[in-house]
């Protein structure tokens, strides 16, 4: 990570890879899958054009949801930004986000931070079909996001982050890994009865949880944390990769994709 921060050429390479990774969903491997509230296609008005900037890094699962949204819809670009004096603590960055954290978004004169807030803003502003106004559908999306955030996400620092080299393995890593697998199964049983959280099409909830589920399926998690990823989650990962045009940045980003970083630590 320090090498990434100090090398302007590597940063430029990553930004270029992200901007060129979008491919049509039908060109990706297709899979099969199988909630109860559907995010139906809605009549759309002319939406504003955008040049959104997401400040963050491709190896961050929290950054990836917002980044996938803007790259899938070709709404903007990644500005690779690392924590530290040359990244999140610069005067320019602190003017956007005084809490010096990523992801941070800039859309014209408007700035916003925290992944959930950024993603809801983007959906409301540019892609309302991903976060419909229907209270029942929006409620299901929020429930799926919050269930992950208040449950499974608490296990990430003890499992995934050590595998990526961000933290030391705690003594109870294997116990946490086994429990996480059961939580993932419970999530799948309720929220993934259909292909995606709200039926056959992606919603905001899918963009939030998919980067984490993809990372948690890496073989290093099974080897070090005894994490058994449910088959339903594995199929969901395949379906998301096929549906999201820019999901290739999970696997390749100049050495700083989720897969590349986990592979490097095995």
Image (tube, rainbow, N blue to C red):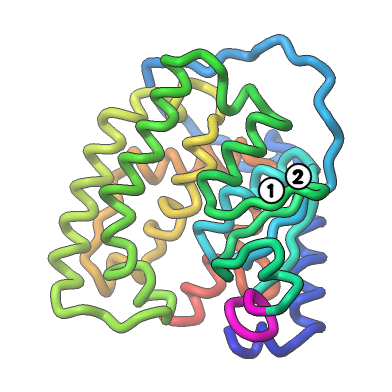
The mark tally for this picture is 2
Residue behind mark 1: 246
Q: In this view, does 37 lie to the left or right of 110?
A: left
Which of the image's four quarters has the C terminus? bottom left
Classify 72 as above or below 101: above
Whether pointer 2 and pointer 1 mark residues with C-beta atoms closer than 8 Å, the reply is: yes
Classify 166 as above or below 23: below
**Residue 152 on the magenta segment:** no
Name which quarter of the figure residue 1 lies in: bottom right
Give the x, y percent position of residue 54.
70, 57
Residue behind mark 2: 23
The foreground one among 157 and 83 is 83
Give the x, y percent position of residue 77.
78, 55
Give the x, y percent position of residue 248.
65, 54
C-alpha distance separating marks 2 and 1? 6 Å
Q: At 63% across and 38% down in the image, what residue appears?
A: 121
Q: Where are the magenta residues, as a range?
A: 82-89
The foreground one among 92 and 164 is 92
Q: Is disc 1 placed on a helix, strand or loop?
A: loop
Classify 46 as above or below 30: above
């Amino acid at each position: 990570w320090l090498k990434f921060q100090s090398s302007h050429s590597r940063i430029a390479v990553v930004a270029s890879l992200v901007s060129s990774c979008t491919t049509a969903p039908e060109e990706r491997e297709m899979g099969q899958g199988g909630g109860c509230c559907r995010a139906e296609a809605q009549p759309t008005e002319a939406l504003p054009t955008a040049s959104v900037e997401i400040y963050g890094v491709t190896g961050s699962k929290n950054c990836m949801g917002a980044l996938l949204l803007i790259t899938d819809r070709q709404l903007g670009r990644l500005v690779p930004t690392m924590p530290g004096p040359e990244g999140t603590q610069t005067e320019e960055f602190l003017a956007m986000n005084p809490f010096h954290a990523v992801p941070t978004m800039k859309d014209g004169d408007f700035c916003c931070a925290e992944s959930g807030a950024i993603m809801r803003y983007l959906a409301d502003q540019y892609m309302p079909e991903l976060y419909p106004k229907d209270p029942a559908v929006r409620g299901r999306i929020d429930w799926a996001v919050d269930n992950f955030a208040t449950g499974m996400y608490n296990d990430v620092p003890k499992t995934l982050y050590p595998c990526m080299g961000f933290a030391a393995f705690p003594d109870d890593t294997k116990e946490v890994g086994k429990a996480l697998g059961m939580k993932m199964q419970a999530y799948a049983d309720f929220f993934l009865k259909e292909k995606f959280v709200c039926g056959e099409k992606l919603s905001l909830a899918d963009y939030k949880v998919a980067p984490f589920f993809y990372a948690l399926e890496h073989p290093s998690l099974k080897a070090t944390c005894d994490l058994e990823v449910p088959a339903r989650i594995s199929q969901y990962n395949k379906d998301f990769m096929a549906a999201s045009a820019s999901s290739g940045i999970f696997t390749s980003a100049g050495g700083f994709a989720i897969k590349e970083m986990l592979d490097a630590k095995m």
